[in-house]
Amino acid sequence: MRRQRTVKVAIAGVGNCASALVQGVEYYRDRQGDLEGLMRQSIGGYRCGDIEFVAAFDVDRRKVGRPLEEAIFAKPNCTRIFQSALPVSNVIVQMGPVLDGVASHMADYPDEAAFRPVDLEPTDVTAALRASGAEVLLSYLPVGSEEAVKHYARACLDARVAMINCVPVFIASDPYWADEFRAAGVPIIGDDIKSQLGATIIHCALVRLCSDRGIGIDRTYQLNTGGNTDFLNMLERSRVMSKKISKTQSVQSQLNHPLDSRNIHVGPSDYVPWQRDNKVCFIRIEGHGFGGGPIELEMRLSVEDSSNSAGVVIDAIRCVKLALERGEAGPLLGPSAYYMKAPPRQLRDSIALEACNAFVDGRDYQMPDVADQKSGLKRPNLSSDI
Ligand SMILES: NC(=O)c1ccc[n+]([C@@H]2O[C@H](COP(=O)([O-])OP(=O)(O)OC[C@H]3O[C@@H](n4cnc5c(N)ncnc54)[C@H](O)[C@@H]3O)[C@@H](O)[C@H]2O)c1
């Protein structure tokens, strides 16, 4: 049988991440040679240009009803435009169910900075997915959209469409949902996308380096600021709980001994409107080395937030395609551990890369026992921490 050379993708949430992704697929489409900015040029023979967008859902009045290639540039999106010329997709953004997708404080901010839901009947997402021929749905909803993400997850199950959950709502890492995806016969990668070179991956690398070099870590924090709608949304503290759990779990998983929750503070910290899609992260580690000698480390990272995760999603999409071709269902453990902050099996990054490579190559891989990793892989109790 001839292999289908495209991966048909649907998007839920046409925000800044979707914009960077749609632009990126076109940007890399015909480029040859050393493709800087990509983690992998090809996965299972699939290149970036093999990704085809076939459906999109949003709730904002400036996006619903518009072609995808226009909606990605509509306000309040503010990510950098690096590929303005886009082909006609014939994908019209459809009205999704709003549910808990839009935080009420959005109404207190200007149009250009905040979501403006339109008053329309939502589309039947399952029917729309079926009609589009989508093979995988990307969940790009705002943090805290528990009900909305689950609505799209259910639609994926009913339409037999795979899912990549970029949001810190626990689906792939929740045993109930993991079983549902297994039973439906479709794969899922999740939860909460890791950026290519973002705050989490650098924080993880630094604490791992300290642990490998015998440095005792006493305390650490990661403070993040940004000016996009992701950061505006996260001003509502009740929505951020899952994000803090996901990010903290990622850092804790790299330590020999997890820190007491009072000594680790990781999470989005403030909304600074003029930063727009520029995210700035401050990391501090306090520890002690040989003979108890004190060590302090401070680091500042400045990145374009949304394109930083799009490069990772491009790889996750191609892994899902391989799983579909191989008939694999349920959470993809290796890719989830490498690409996501809150995967079903949290692994040290070097091990996650091995597991992900084995998946891509189609090799069997024995997942290490939790004890082998000597790390705290449980969800930390953050109740005192937010
Ligand atoms: N580097 C990164 O940017 C990064 C990294 C990790 C995780 N994430 C997560 O990815 C998600 C998307 O990030 P973003 O920067 O694109 O956010 P965004 O705020 O730019 O976009 C969210 C989009 O979802 C739409 N929306 C709201 N409710 C909806 C619903 N019920 N149905 C359909 N659409 C709905 C909004 O109108 C908006 O277009 C966030 O949860 C974010 O935390 C991003």
Image (cartoon, rainbow, N blue to C red):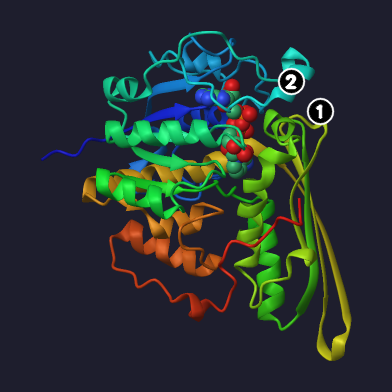
Q: Is residue 155 left or right of residue 12?
A: left
Q: Is residue 303 above or below residue 174?
A: above
Name, please, the residue furthest toward the front: 383
Residues marked 2 and 1 touching at CB (< 8 Å): yes
Q: Which mark is residue 379?
A: none
Residue at horizontal 70 percent and vertical 69 percent from the top: 207
Q: Is residue 349 above or below residue 184?
A: below
Residue 212 in the image, given as x and y percentages of width and height: 66, 79
Residue at horizontal 63 percent and vertical 51 percent from the top: 197
Three-letter amino acid code of the residue under disc 1: Pro
Q: Quadrant of residue 94?
A: top left
Three-letter amino acid code of the residue under disc 2: Ala
Residue 150 in the image, given as x and y percentages of width and height: 45, 36
Q: Secondary structure at mark 2?
A: helix
Name, please, the residue furthest toward the bottom: 291
Q: Which residue is mark 1?
A: 273
Say whether disc 2 or disc 1 marks the residue closer to the N-terminus: 2
Q: Is the CB–ligand 1 distance for label 1 below 8 Å?
A: no
Q: How many marks?
A: 2
Residue 340 in the image, given as x and y percentages of width and height: 52, 52
Residue 14 visible in the picture: no
Q: Nearer the viewer, residue 291 or 249?
A: 249
Q: Secondary structure at mark 1?
A: helix
Q: Is the CB–ligand 1 distance for label 2 below 8 Å?
A: no
Q: Which mark is residue 113?
A: 2
Q: Is residue 148 left or right of residue 287?
A: left
Residue at horizontal 49 percent and vertical 80 percent from the top: 372
Q: Is residue 248 above or below residue 232?
A: below
Q: Quadrant of the N terminus?
A: top left
